[in-house]
Amino acid sequence: MLTKTTITFYSIWALCVLGTSCSEPKTTEQTTQVQGTDSDTITSVHKTTERLTTPPKVFYYDYTEKRGTEDAIDMSQDDALAALKSLPEEDGNYFGMELSDGSVVQFMYDGNKSGWFLDIPDPKTQESYNADVTMDDAVNIIGDVYGGKSADDIQAAYH
């Protein structure tokens, strides 16, 4: 279950949360107004987040082996999955993706019962959406992001 909490994630990408290095997801809004029979107006708002077409950039770090990326880099989906799966299950090791809209989806191993901690920073509210996930969940989320899903889509799926 996804929960909304104040940001406490340890990633070097925390600047995104503070709104200094990433933009908000692009959302389109369609408003429809219908005049009711008793002179009341009914307004319907439909929001959709654009599908992302540019692959995410990846960042990760393995504190055990002292290896990883200094910045987010271009990486194929297969290489991204290999990088995640190569991380030892040791507290603090992390993996993340910077999406083309500037949003971030990241994981950190923290020894919880599922193994991985999902963190989706929200720069607009300066909060973060979190969930405990399994390695299988993380693999599926990476596939979803490479398939064009946005951080909002991931958040909705784990709400």
Image (spheres, grey):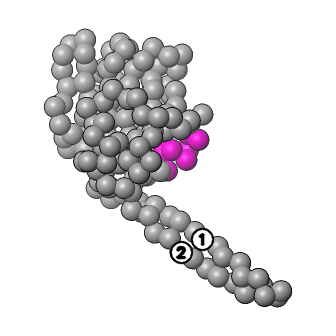
User: Which residue corresponds to the image point at 18% horizontal and 30% vertical from the top-left?
Assistant: 69
User: Which residue corresponds to the image point at 25% horizontal and 44% vertical from the top-left?
Assistant: 57
Tell me: 28 left or right of 97.
right
User: Which residue corresponds to the image point at 76% horizontal and 83% vertical from the top-left?
Assistant: 40
**Chain-order first, disc 2 or disc 1:** 2
Q: Secondary structure at mark 2?
A: strand
- Residue 104 x %, y %: 35, 43
Amino acid carrying label 2: it is Gln
* Residue bearing mark 1: 45
- Residue 149 x %, y %: 43, 52
Tell me: 89 left or right of 6.
left
Q: Secondary structure at mark 1?
A: strand
Cβ atoms at labels 2 and 1 below 8 Å apart? yes
Instruction: Tell me which segment is drawn in magenta.
Output: 153-159
* Residue bearing mark 2: 30
Residue 55 colored magenta?
no
- Residue 39 x %, y %: 78, 88
Quadrant holding the C terminus = top right
- Please tell me in which quadrant of the rendered image residue 94 appears: top left
Amino acid carrying label 1: it is Val
User: Which residue corresponds to the image point at 35% horizontal and 12% vertical from the top-left?
Assistant: 90
> In terms of depth relative to the viewer, which is nearer, 85 or 14?
14
- Residue 118 x %, y %: 45, 32
> In terms of depth relative to the viewer, which is nearer, 58 or 78?
58
